[in-house]
Image: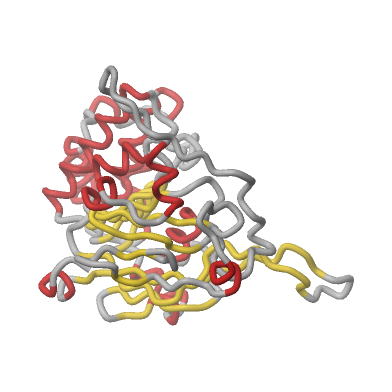
Amino acid sequence: MRSEQMEDKTLVKIENLTKNFISKKSFFGKPLSYVHAVDNVSLDIFKGETLGIVGESGCGKSTLGRSILRLTEPTSGKVIYDKTDLVSLSKEDMRQMRKRLQLVFQDPYASLNPRMTVKDLIKAPLDVFNIGNESERMEKVFQIMKQVGLTEEQLNRYPHEFSGGQRQRIVIARAIILDPEFVVCDEPVSALDVSVRSQVLNLLNTLQKEKNLTYMFISHDLSVVKYISDRIAVMYLGRVVELAEKDELYSHAAHPYTKALLSAVPIAEVGRKREISVLEGDVPSPINPPKGCYFNTRCPYADERCRKEKPELRDIGCGHMCACHKV
């Protein structure tokens, strides 16, 4: 993963993280089947970087982000943050840790209380953790609003009085007002107009440089992920199937699933064509995933080994990780 120097800068280390949801119970409440949302994921996230997470809807991207922050309790595994295992912390210790870990939600309107003003929404984290007196809190609110492109005249307005892009700026302001180190951005621009997306992405980039933030950026939009990420992890059915620097991934994708995803990205150049890789069949059910490689039911290169033996994520050169028997 990158260089040995970057290994020393690991901020979040995810080890064998798994999250299963009960999908069916017996008459007496005994679990009969599970949805395998996140399946044995291991990742390192470096200080100051943006790690992009991509994949089809339902592949476990959002569940992974929420499990790291323990908004969804993991079934098993570890999340080592600054030498502390978040999974083993008590509720109170985890509550205190949340000052350093924040989340930007996909739908800004749904994540804002419609009965609270912008002032109260942004100031709420300071109130919860009892940081500073009232005047110091308001000074912090003014400062953060300016940083995200909002004005003091908007302090007493309510969420419904703002556009989608402005509401997302409010959500971002609320997330960074405690000066966190790690922020999970869960599809933060997917609910916005295309013309507004670049503004919000540029804002996230600017804040990252000013505050030395580390992002996990979750999205299904490969062009957005390429723009903002340093490294990209590709997920399929709850597992990471490929991980690499963004330029390496886009120019030398190794996994058949990654190649299929990239072939579907529109090309902006007139006259330039790309060979489209069409995947046959549907995504298997996470309740009953296939044996062996989860992708074998849709992979044109699958053989008997793929159908029996689960491939491990391994380094295929220069920190490029891939989980495929054919690579």
Left or right placement of residue 123 versus residue 288 in this view: left
Task: Give the image quarter of residue 150.
Answer: top left
Task: Give the image quarter of residue 292.
Answer: bottom right
Where residue 228 appears, as percent x and y from the top left, is 24, 43
Residue 79 lies, with reference to residue 220, above or below; the image says below
Where residue 307 appears, as percent x and y from the top left, is 60, 68
Q: Is residue 134 visible?
A: no
Residue located at (29% from left, 24% from top): 272
Residue 152 lies, with reference to residue 312, above or below; the image says above
Residue located at (85% from left, 71% from top): 26
Q: Nearer the viewer, residue 101 or 284?
A: 284
Where residue 118 appears, as percent x and y from the top left, is 35, 35
Residue 215 lies, with reference to residue 14, above or below; the image says above
Quarter of the image for the N terminus: give it.
bottom left
Left or right placement of residue 81 versus residue 159 in this view: left
Task: Give the image quarter of residue 280.
Answer: top right
Looking at this view, name the residue that lies furthest to the right. Answer: 27
Q: Nearer the viewer, residue 220 or 306?
A: 306
Quarter of the image for the C terminus: give it.
bottom left
Where residue 253 appears, as percent x and y from the top left, is 32, 51
Number of numbered markers: 0
Q: Nearer the viewer, residue 32 or 321?
A: 321
Left or right placement of residue 95 versus residue 59 in this view: left
Q: Is residue 241 visible?
A: yes
Residue located at (33% from left, 70% from top): 97
Colour scheme employed for the rendering of this structure: secondary structure
Residue 83 lies, with reference to residue 258, above or below; the image says below
